[in-house]
Structures are given as C-alpha cells and as structure tokens.
Image: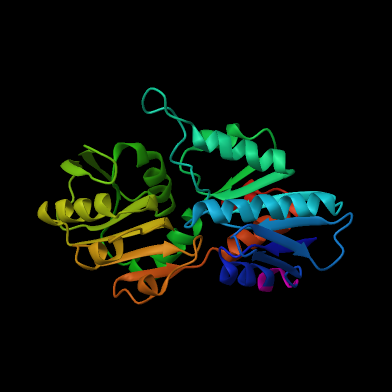
C-alpha cells in the first residue's frame, strides 16, 4: 500500500504515515503561474493500493481540485485501487434542496470524485449520513466519538457530566456519545435559525442545574450556535460548558467569538489543517484523529473489518 497527500493537511498525513510506519509517496502537488493545479508522482504506483489523504476545507475548491487531479494521476499511472481519504468532506452541508432552484452540491462532488477514478471513499463524521448513498462506490464513514469519549473520561471523568446536543438534528450524535460515557444524561438545546450563519437559542430540554455540560457537534463554523448554547446553559444553572466538535472550520470571526464566549474550552480534531490564530487561541484545544484514520486505512488495505473499530 502507499499513502499520498495533497497540500490541505500535511501534518495529519505525516502523523498517519508515522503510525502506519510507511513513507509518504513522493509527489509534487503545485501550481502553475495561473494557479492551475499540477500533480506529478515521482515513484512507481503500478498495481499498488493507494490512499490519497486530502481534506476539502478552506480553500475548498483548490483542495477539491488537488484531490481530483491526484486521483486522475494515480489512475493513469495504473494504480490497482485508489481510496480517497477525506477527513473533512466539504460541501456536505449542501445535501438537499433547501429551496427552489438550488443545487445538491454534495451529490455533485460525490460524482466528481467517482468519475475522477476513486474506487473507495473514507471520511470522518459526515454531516449527513445519507451522503454515503450519494457515492456509487464503497464509502466508509468513521466516527470521532471514541477519541472524544476517551479524552472526556481522562480529563473530566470525575465531574457530574451531561451531554448536550446544540440542536434537535444532533440528538443521535449526542446520544451515541452519552452511551459511551456510561449512559450520561442527555439535554437538547432547541433553537431557531433565522438565516445562514446565525442562530437564536429558544429553550433547553432537560435539567442542567449544577451539571458539567458537554456540547457535541460535527462542524463548528461561525461558532454562533455553540456560543449561544453555552450562554443558555450557564443561564440555566450549568456549572460549566465545554464543546467537542470533529471539524473545526472556524471561519470569519469564529475564534474571537469562542474566546469571548461562556465556553470554558472548545476541543476540535485535526481533520482540518489549523491556522496560527486557532493554535494560539486560549480556549481551543486539538485532538488528533491520526491513529483512528491510520487504523481504518490499515484495515481497508488488509480487507478486514472497519466497523469493529467502534464496537
């Protein structure tokens, strides 16, 4: 097997390669003067099982094109099987038609990856489970919950824990985490979103008085939902509020918003490459998903069970 990467998240790719004890495939992924992407593979991949690790976060279109061109280069170099490893699948929030004359961009991106020549897709915490069905090739959706629950037990196991879903749509995710935490109690924040990027907390379903509340979500973008939810929890008597999110998009003024919020801590994984402003934030911490990702890659290469990772 071989592991190749684009430029979106080199630290994660190096950590995965280190865990697997294999070198990253030698390749150049660079730009022409007019910003066109050019890929050149510097070693033989004929007949190999190749995994291309590339998140499609900001800049989403550039990283997506890098992924597609890497896959095409490998296909034309006669790789036996190509697996697109996409820790963060961009465009996942456009998974349905929210109004007339709007696209389903997640399906379009799935088609692009398939047509480019990918034989399999591996991702982590897809925003919507049905996106697996958008692909006509095998698709594995990993969960960061085991990594998060282990961290919660190690750091906050002695506290009076309560898992909180920041909206009704995330209840399944929150329930799964609560189950891993010895069936911790569950609360739900009921909110109404007036427009994209803004949210208004309405009320809290569940008694959070004196509880150490753990908000759980898959994506934190503007961070408005989490910050409003944390404020509402503290107002309702919660002792403390922290948040665990798989994908730290953190666009615009999100980092400053988190630093000034009622959140004691925001924990995100390294599924997306972080900028200095995120690394320097006083209450944002990183968890690595490299071992989880590497173990899944190893099992796919060995043709063994991936789902048993979460038993």
Q: Is residue 38 left or right of residue 166?
A: right
Q: Quadrant of the N terminus?
A: bottom right
Magenta range is 18-22
Q: Position of residue 227 (x, y in %)?
A: 23, 56
Q: Is residue 20 magenta?
A: yes
Residue at 71 percent across and 63 percent down: it is 4
On screen, residue 213 above or below 196: below
Q: Residue at x 17, y 62 (%)?
A: 239
- The answer to whether one can see residue 311 in this image is no
Report the number of numbered marks: 0
Measuring from the top left, give residue 41's x and y in whole percent. 78, 64
Q: Does 34 lie within the magenta span?
A: no
Quarter of the image for residue 113 reads top right
Question: Above or below — where is 184 with respect to 290?
Answer: above
Q: Nearer the viewer, residue 81 or 148?
A: 81
Which residue, as the protein is rendered here, is positioned at the far top? 100
Left or right of residue 193: residue 103: right
- The residue at the far front in this view is 34
Q: Residue 99 location, x and y as percent? A: 36, 25
The answer to whether residue 65 is seen in the rendering is yes
Q: Is residue 69 above or below residue 117?
A: below
């Amino acid at each position: 097997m071989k592991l190749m990467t684009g430029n979106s998240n080199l630290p994660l790719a190096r950590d995965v390669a280190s865990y697997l004890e294999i070198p990253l495939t030698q390749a150049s992924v660079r730009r022409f003067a007019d910003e066109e992407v050019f890929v050149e593979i510097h070693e033989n991949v004929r007949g190999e099982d190749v995994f291309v690790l590339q998140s499609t976060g900001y800049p989403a279109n550039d990283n997506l094109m890098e992924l597609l061109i890497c896959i095409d280069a490998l296909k034309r170099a006669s790789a036996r099987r190509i697996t697109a490893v996409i820790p963060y699948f961009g465009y996942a929030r456009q998974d349905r038609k929210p109004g007339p004359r709007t696209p389903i961009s997640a399906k379009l991106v799935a088609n692009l990856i398939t047509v480019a020549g990918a034989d399999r897709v591996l991702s982590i915490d897809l925003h919507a489970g049905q996106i697996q069905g958008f692909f006509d090739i095998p698709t594995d959706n990993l969960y960061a919950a085991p990594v998060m629950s282990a961290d919660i037990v190690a750091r906050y196991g002695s506290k009076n824990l309560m898992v909180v879903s920041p909206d009704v749509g995330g209840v399944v995710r929150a329930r799964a985490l609560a189950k891993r935490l010895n069936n911790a109690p569950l609360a739900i924040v009921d909110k109404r979103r007036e427009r994209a990027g803004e949210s208004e907390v309405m009320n809290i379903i569940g008694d959070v008085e004196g509880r150490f509340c753990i908000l759980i979500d898959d994506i934190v973008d503007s961070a408005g939902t989490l910050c409003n939810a944390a404020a509402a929890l503290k107002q309702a008597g919660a002792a403390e509020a922290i948040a665990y999110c798989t994908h730290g998009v953190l666009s615009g003024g999100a980092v400053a918003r988190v630093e000034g919020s009622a959140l004691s801590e925001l924990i995100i994984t390294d599924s997306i490459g972080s900028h200095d402003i995120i690394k320097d934030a006083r209450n944002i911490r990183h968890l690595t998903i490299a071992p989880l990702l590497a173990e899944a890659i190893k099992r796919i290469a060995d043709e063994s069970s991936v789902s048993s990772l979460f038993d």
